[in-house]
Image: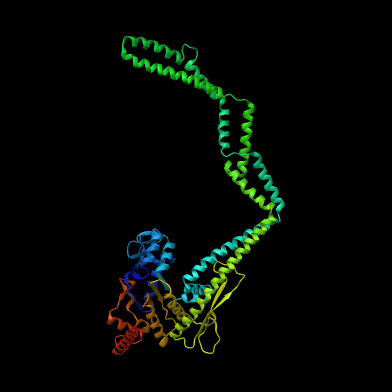
Amino acid sequence: MLESLHVKNLALIEECEIEFSQGLNILTGETGAGKSILLGSVNLALGARCDKSVIRSGCDEASVELVFSANDRVRRLLSEADLPADDDIVIISRKITPQKSIFKINGETVISRQVKDLASELLDIHGQHEHQSLLNTLRQRDMIDAYGGAGIYELLALVSAASHDYKGALEELDKIREKSSNREREMSLLEYECKEISDAELVPGEDDELEEQYRRMTQAEKLAESVSEAIQLVSGDGTQDAGALISRAIQSISRAASLDEGASELEEMLRNAEEILGDFALSASRYSDGLSFDEEEFSRVEKRLDLINTLKSKFGNTVSKVLEYYDEKSAELEKLKNLEEYIASLEKKTEDAKKAYVKACERLTAERQKACDEFSKNLKKTLEGLNFLGVEFFVQLNTDTSVVSSKGMDTVEFMISTNPGEPVRPVRNVASGGELSRIMLGIKTILAKKDDIDALIFDEIDTGISGHTAKEVAKKLSELSREHQVICITHLAQIAAMADRHFLISKEVVSGKTVTGINALDEIEEISELARLLGGDESSEAALNNARELKNNADKEKR
């Protein structure tokens, strides 16, 4: 449920906090006091669009914070989104500045989409004009699907997957049929490309080896000069090269070693150096011999590299990519060579996909029909309780087998007659604004028993009603509040009298600025507000007595 709402520096609200309760929470106040601002602040916290004009005049920023109690389902959703889910509450906040908005869930900064996704599991808001969605047949179908619940949603998932497969098969078949008209030209091009790659007899990694070989060949002369100079310095003319000098040094240190045993270690070091120089001279000579090549070999490597680089520029930036391209185009070529057989196989695949789609749709239609029948019966009974006397209502389900959609082949039309003797016609052609509002309340009532959303908000659900009808709407809201937390903005005393907790929204001028405030009413204050709503002088004893009687009757009704 929604535990509390905290608003700061938003429009006419300087700062206020509301702590809601279980059951029916009623908000009343004079016209223009700011009731719509409060509901708007909830929408803002849950991701509604806004601009800097919502920030209270003279302030740098505005903020809204909602605190919900969390159940296991909500905690699981938070955990799946990698958001903190350890406590029994969910805190959703939004800070609004002239430059940007910052959303947070349990202290973690998030994007608005995450807030909206979570909000759909926490709260259901029925705004002043939401009943207009009843005029949209797609929304009507969504309501039937919601009423059908898990059974319909499982079938919708099957239909969605089947429609995806069927559409994919159709698109593939259309492409191949289109290709068949250009078959000869396509085959000629593919054969040319495949032959070009095949004739090259490419080997993965070959280009890297050839490039290294080519680099060494082009640098061979410089390499040979440098290696030859090194060999000359180590063992050149036998007098001044490193080998000769090391040999003379060994003779000198050997004489020293014969006089002092301590010089033997130095002699050993020089003899090791002499051995290393000998090994170097041998290895360098062999390396130098390997640098020799003939022009024919150089030409072969150069041409091979040119061929490979040409293929890479056409078909891929590596030999492996070129070979992948070859495999892909070879498969295409094979399809074109056997196009008739391939088209036949695709036609069968498409037909099988269509059958699977139709079968899934038929199951969905059957389940929807059950939901429509039950929905019609329950809503008719609910509408009779909302003072629709002699009402006739049913859901008309139509199926168009030519439709390919992730939602199936069905369309839905809500049909109603609000007066005895009148024919049943689509809701969009019959109901007035006030009637639509009551119909939506009825729908919310029966859907609420099907879902797990704890909190429902109704903004002026009483539009266009009065008298006995208002009393029936009040009873229905109270009935709904036994299973769900209900927050309702109203201007009718009959509805306000049913409150389990009553809040008054008021407006006053403080230091030259208009400020909207909200206060929970005690029993005496509630009676005074009911007297005002009844249209009497709230200070007169007669008006107060009427209000007390209305409240007493409401309390009896709730019991």
* Picture coordinates of residue 529, whole percent (x, y): 32, 82
Q: Nearer the viewer, residue 138 or 282?
A: 282
Q: Give the percent coordinates (x, y) of residue 149.
A: 47, 72
Whether 40 is drawn above or below 474: the answer is: above
Q: On the rendered structure, is 534 left or right of 222?
A: left
Q: Quadrant of residue 23?
A: bottom left
Residue 248 can be seen in this image: yes
Residue pictured at 33% horizontal, 14% vertical: 263
Q: Residue at x 41, y 83 (%)?
A: 473
Q: Height in image: 377 above or below 106?
A: below
Of 399 and 236, nearer the camera is 399
Splitting the image into 4 quarters, where does residue 387 fall? Answer: bottom left
Q: Which colouring convention does the figure follow?
A: rainbow
- Image spot of residue 316 (x, y percent): 59, 44
| Image quadrant in which you'd find residue 261 | top left
Can residue 96 be seen from the camera position used here? no
Q: Residue 537: percent from the left, percent from the top?
A: 32, 87
Looking at the image, residue 124 sits to the left or right of residue 418; the answer is: left
Q: Quadrant of the N terminus?
A: bottom left
